[in-house]
Image (cartoon, rainbow, N blue to C red):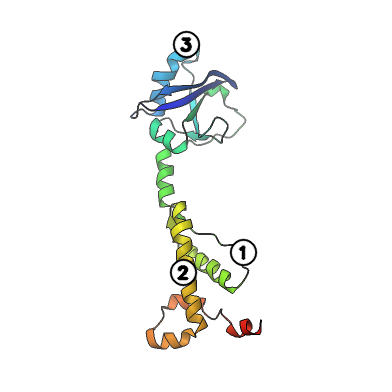
Amino acid sequence: MPTIIVNVEYKSKSIFGWEGLPVGENMNVKEFYENIIMPEIKRELWNKDIIAYFSHTKISEKEKIGLRCNIWETAKQFGVFVTFKLKDDVDLDKPAIHSIDAFELMRIALMQNYLPEFNTSRNSFNQLCIDLCEWIKINGDGWIRRDNVNTIGKKFITDLSKSLWYIDNYSYKTLNDRFKIPEVFINFFNRTHPESYKKA
């Protein structure tokens, strides 16, 4: 059975400190608190409303999570360290923070597009890579998942830049007359200047 590490705070003090507890894979956060945690704390605190925070370590940044979220799926995404704060412990001067639905965050993360990053332009070729990334961004495209950006995305942009650079170096107009280069790429030509390299 999976385990999460739980801490319960009331008035900024820990009343149940960092203990590993088994968690049912089909429980939501509220059910876990009521079935597993409540019997471990004082009876007079049972009627307090709770706020749940998940994190990857005891001291890392915590994410506030809604009580209806599946506790094990949330722990896999946001960390197995769970802090329950009893409602009296919430600072009333602070504006209310909306709870986060962990599944909605996962759905958004899966749908979000990422683009590779290139160093600030040092030369025309680097600028071409940066401009291609910007063009992809403007058109609302990119790569899903950040790890794909650094492997697939960066290689794609670099290879496309090399192809455009090569064509530009040998006069894209000649190639365009014979094969008709797609219109979207026309703005990415006239960047190579072989004569300046010869002078250098």
Q: Check disc 3 and report the residue beneath it.
A: 43
- Gap in angstroms between the C-alphas marked 1 and 3: 61 Å
| Disc 2 element | helix
* Earlier-in-chain disc, 1 versus 3: 3
Q: Nearer the viewer, residue 129 or 136?
A: 129
- Residue 180 location in percent, x, y? 39, 83
Q: Residue at x 48, y 14 (%)?
A: 41
| Disc 1 element | loop
- Image-based side of 36 in relation to 8, left or right: left
Q: Check disc 1 and report the residue beneath it.
A: 120
Q: Is residue 61 above or below residue 171?
A: above
Q: Is residue 95 visible to the viewer in this orientation of the structure?
A: yes
Front disc: 1 or 3: 1
Q: Residues within 10 Å of mark 3 (few under 14, many from 20)?
A: few
Q: Is residue 51 above or below residue 98?
A: above
Q: In this view, does 163 lie above or below 41?
A: below
Q: Which residue is drawn at 50% across and 15% down?
A: 45
Q: Which of 149 and 9 is in front in this view?
A: 149
- Image-based side of 10 in relation to 200, left or right: left
* Earlier-in-chain disc, 2 versus 1: 1
Q: Residue at x 46, y 14 (%)?
A: 40
- Image-based side of 155 in relation to 118, left or right: left
